[in-house]
Image (cartoon, rainbow, N blue to C red):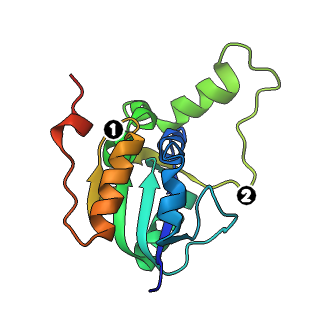
Amino acid sequence: MAKIKVATTSLAGCFGCHMSFLDLDERLVTLAEVAEFDRSPITDIEHCGPCDIGLIEGGVCNSENVHVLREFRKNCKILVAVGACAINGGLPALRNPISLEACLLEAYRDGIGVENAQIPNDPELPLLLDKVHPIHEIVKIDYFLPGCPPSADVFWTFLTDLLEGREPALPYELVHYD
């Protein structure tokens, strides 16, 4: 039986969802028995190839994020928004009420401790977007895994449901925040 292919990536975020995914610990070995990892923190693959499941954390804040997200959508049969930043922009979206110019000036020119003030303008840097967007505003998303970050048990329950051909269902105990 062919293994399913799984890819993951991080856009604008803290990489916490990936750390939580890696908290699957020994369950990663069990997962590796039925899944092959494409682009992920476990591999050194730069571009996502054809995959069954794509897990994406982080919001969309620059042109490179848009490119990576569209590449995942094109190559993944099932695309999953993982965590608060991917679902609603999360902490990176806190800059949305402030203009991009004001953010850049504060970060690179006017901020406390800034020396040799200069806003980076290397043409190889990805262009910043005016706002941070949740990923569903850019591409179609098939599933949303809530949390900041979702726990390893949320990842495990979701993935095992999919792998066993069930519609993923997260019990209340895994997603409550009270």
Check disc 2 and report the residue beneath it. Answer: 123
Looking at the picture, which amino acid does disc 1 mark?
Answer: Gly
Query: Where residue 52 sits: x, y (%)?
Result: 41, 76
Decide which of 143, 85 is in the foreground and name it: 143
Q: Can you see residue 89?
A: no
Badge 1 density bin: few <14, some 14–19, many ≥20, Cα 10 Å:
some
Q: Provide residue 121's location: percent of width, then percent of height.
A: 72, 47
Which amino acid type is marked by label 2? Answer: Pro
Q: CA distance from mark 1 to mark 2?
A: 35 Å
Residue holding disc 1: 147
Q: Residue furthest bottom?
A: 1
Instruction: Assign the N terminus to one quadrant of the image.
Output: bottom left
Instruction: Report the mark closest to the observer, 1 or 2.
Output: 1
Q: Quadrant of the C terminus?
A: top left
- Residue shown at the point (37%, 52%) measured from the top left: 156
Residue at the image position 45 percent from the left and 50 percent from the top: 57
Q: Residue 46: where, in percent of width, then height?
A: 66, 68
Please tell me which residue lies in front, 178 or 66: 178
- Front residue of this view, candidates 6 and 108: 6
Q: Secondary structure at mark 1?
A: loop
The numbered disc on residue 50 is: none
